[in-house]
Amino acid sequence: MSHISPMKTQLKAVSFDLWDTLVDDDSDEPKRKAQGLRPKPDERRHLLWQALERHAPVDLAQVSAAFDAADAAFNKAWKGDSITWPVADRVTVALKELGRDLPPDDLRQLAADLGRMEVDIPPDPIPGVKAALRELSGRYKICIASDAIVTPADGLREILEGHGLKQYFSGFAFSDEVGHSKPHPDMFNSAARQLGVELSEIVHVGDRDHNDVKGPQALGMKAILFTATRDDDRDTTTADAICERFADLPGIIDGLSG
């Protein structure tokens, strides 16, 4: 089922969120469990604890509390200032909470290990995504516009490559490379520049009303709320259309384009 608003414009491009739009955010957790691995939040804290323990003893509970504080500070910057800190910066905040530090090489290695977790055991693509991207790329330019929360841009490209999806995109606006996160205009302006189109010629597809609908619409773009794995915002969205499955997406986008 989908809802489409009556207003149309000529569309030349489509930008996509990544998490819970192209890939199912936590679908890597059952894979980790099947391999006897810790959940990602626990493993991140354990890796920091392990790195510190090599130099001097520290309580795991204290490390976890410091990591929680760093996560809270990250979320405040992300949601309040539209900035996603690199993982190394988040770890540095946790270290300050603990009154500890790590040698630069150890910090770099820890940040790399944290950033590789979703690359080494990737989340699953959402069913139908490849067929939809293949069809859409035949008549629209396509770009990613996604926040990098833990996995950096290079790792996100690697995840897309591993699923055979990267080939369909002509641009990549990742928050750690752009310098701001959604809904900041820089993210969508970067997508438009990379694709060589006007903002008004892009429709953005994503799962969060604040980031993926309100942000683009404020810039004169169209926006589609994608609800295949996350439909929290369905009842309150101002999206130009709601899409529940990838099989319907090409038709919905064509319907929005005059």
Image: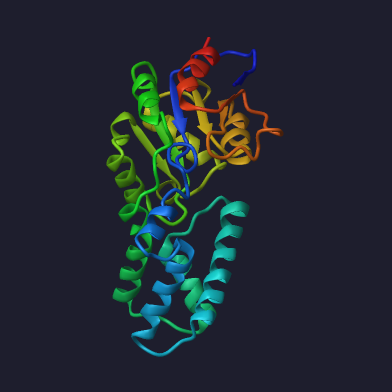
Tell me where residue 91 appears, x and y as whole percent. 45, 70
In terms of image quadrants, where is residue 114?
bottom left
Q: Residue at (34%, 85%) from the top-left corner?
A: 54
Residue visible at 33% across and 80% down in the picture? 103
Q: Judge left or right: residue 51 versus residue 18.
A: left
Where 240 sits versus 187, above or below? above
**Displayed quadrant of residue 62:** bottom right
Q: Looking at the picture, how far across and down is residue 239, in whole percent? A: 63, 27
Horizontally, is 71 left or right of 130 in the view? right
Could you tell me which residue is drawn at 33 percent across and 45 percent down? 159
Residue found farthest to the bottom: 56
In terms of depth relative to the viewer, which is nearer, 117 or 186?
117
Of all residues shown, which one is farthest toward the top? 258
Place of residue 168 in the rendered image (x, y in percent of width and height, measured from the top left): 32, 29
Which of these two is toward me, 137 or 42?
A: 42
Instruction: Give the quadrant of the N terminus.
Output: top right
- From the viewer's perspective, is residue 55 above or below residue 91? below
The image's colour scheme reads rainbow
Q: Nearer the viewer, residue 177 or 113?
A: 113
**Furthest residue toward right:** 236
Q: Is residue 122 above or below residue 194?
A: below
Residue positioned 45% across, 19% down in the render: 250
Residue 236, image x and y in percent?
A: 71, 34
